[in-house]
Image (cartoon, helix red, strand yellow):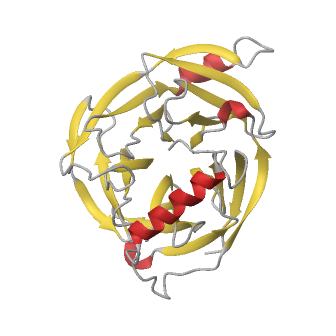
């Protein structure tokens, strides 16, 4: 979601949303609440990606995108130095409101699923060959501009879609998509009721209508998701505003028999609060998250160290 950089406007919008939410957030049961986790800065990123939204790994790079009408490009940062080394345009793609990235061993997926006014009925996915992306990223030594790759487009819509009463009130926004056992899991960003619905998308189908598989009472708005196929653990990133400035959080959820095991999900607040939007597993004990530029701070990459399981 695009940020308004005026602090006055930011405060006003925070208060307005707080009034809208009221006491909608479900109570957090003691068995689900874990310790507050520190967010440790890793790198401040250039203004080229000040609207960073979404993270995914390939062999050599951490990839990110800009949301909300930015260029239809992928931005590759060196995995070790965290320095911008590749900008790759996607042929045949348009950035209406790109929000999330996901990757498997063959493809990188870009989800054009942002919908904070609730008016979009048809949403887009773009699929890019990782082999093609890797090849073009090695070209043009000395320049970050690496040319372009072809993106395959598919579309989906919500089978349970309902018209929104206005901006920042819809339950059909989305900023979080990840791959789980061959399917794309999409988590809605519910401005109205602070829950999230899970949809499952077949990545090879060009047109599909998706139905909600379940609703999770996350107590905030989900902005990112990533699945660890080694540990079978899902991480959801989000935020809540019970006052003007609110707080960020993550949910850690085991996936059992292809379903989220909500009964044993663990919740952690994050410190400090920022506009954290991208999330990816760095290894089994660490998550990387990214934030847009906002009144809360500059665009950056940061690390969360998880408690031992």
Q: Is residue 292 visible?
A: yes
Which of the pair 131/50 is nearer the observer? 50
Hey, which quadrant is residue 273 in on the image?
Answer: bottom right
Q: Is residue 55 visible?
A: no
Give the image location of residue 17, x and y in percent: 45, 63
Count of marks overlaid on the render: 0
Residue reaching furthest bottom? 30
Q: In this rendering, would 164 be left or right of 254? A: left
Which of the pair 135/219 is nearer the observer? 219
Hey, which quadrant is residue 71 in on the image?
Answer: top right
Give the image location of residue 185, x and y in percent: 37, 50
* Residue at left offset 32%, top offset 57%: 198
Where's the C terminus, which quadrant? bottom right
Which of the pair 235/299 is nearer the observer? 299
Give the image location of residue 204, x and y in percent: 31, 32
* Residue at left offset 34%, top offset 66%: 193
The correct choice, above or below, for 209 with respect to 199 in the image is above
* Residue at left offset 34%, top offset 36%: 203
* Residue at left offset 62%, top offset 35%: 63
Q: In this rendering, would 24 be left or right of 162? A: right
Give the image location of residue 106, x and y in percent: 48, 31
């Amino acid at each position: 979601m695009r940020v308004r950089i005026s602090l006055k406007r930011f405060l006003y919008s925070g208060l307005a949303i707080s009034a809208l939410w009221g006491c909608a957030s479900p109570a957090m049961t003691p068995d689900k609440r874990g310790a507050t986790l520190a967010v440790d800065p890793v790198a401040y990123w250039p203004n080229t990606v000040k609207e960073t939204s979404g993270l995914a790994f390939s062999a050599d790079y951490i990839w990110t995108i800009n949301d909300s009408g930015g260029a239809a490009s992928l931005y590759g940062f060196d995995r070790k130095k965290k320095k911008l080394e590749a900008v790759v345009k996607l042929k045949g793609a348009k950035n209406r409101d790109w929000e999330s990235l996901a990757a498997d061993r063959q493809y990188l997926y870009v989800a054009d699923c942002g919908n904070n006014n609730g008016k979009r009925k048809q949403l887009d996915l773009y699929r890019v060959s990782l082999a093609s992306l890797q090849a073009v990223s090695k070209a043009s030594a000395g320049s970050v501009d690496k040319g372009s790759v072809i993106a395959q487009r598919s579309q989906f819509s919500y089978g349970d879609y309902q018209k929104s009463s206005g901006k920042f009130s819809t339950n059909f926004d989305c900023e979080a998509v990840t791959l789980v056992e061959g399917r794309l899991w999409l988590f809605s960003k519910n401005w109205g009721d602070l829950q999230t619905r899970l949809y499952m998308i077949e990545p090879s189908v060009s047109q599909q209508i998706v139905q909600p598989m379940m609703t999770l009472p996350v107590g905030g708005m989900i902005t990112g998701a990533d699945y660890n196929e080694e540990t079978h653990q899902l991480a959801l990133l989000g935020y809540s505003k019970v006052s003007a400035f609110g707080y960020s959080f993550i949910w850690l959820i085991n996936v059992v028999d292809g379903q989220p095991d909500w009964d044993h999900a663990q919740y952690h607040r994050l410190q400090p609060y920022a506009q954290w939007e991208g999330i990816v597993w760095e290894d089994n004990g660490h998550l990387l998250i990214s934030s847009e530029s906002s009144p809360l701070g500059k665009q950056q990459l940061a690390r969360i160290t998880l408690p031992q399981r």
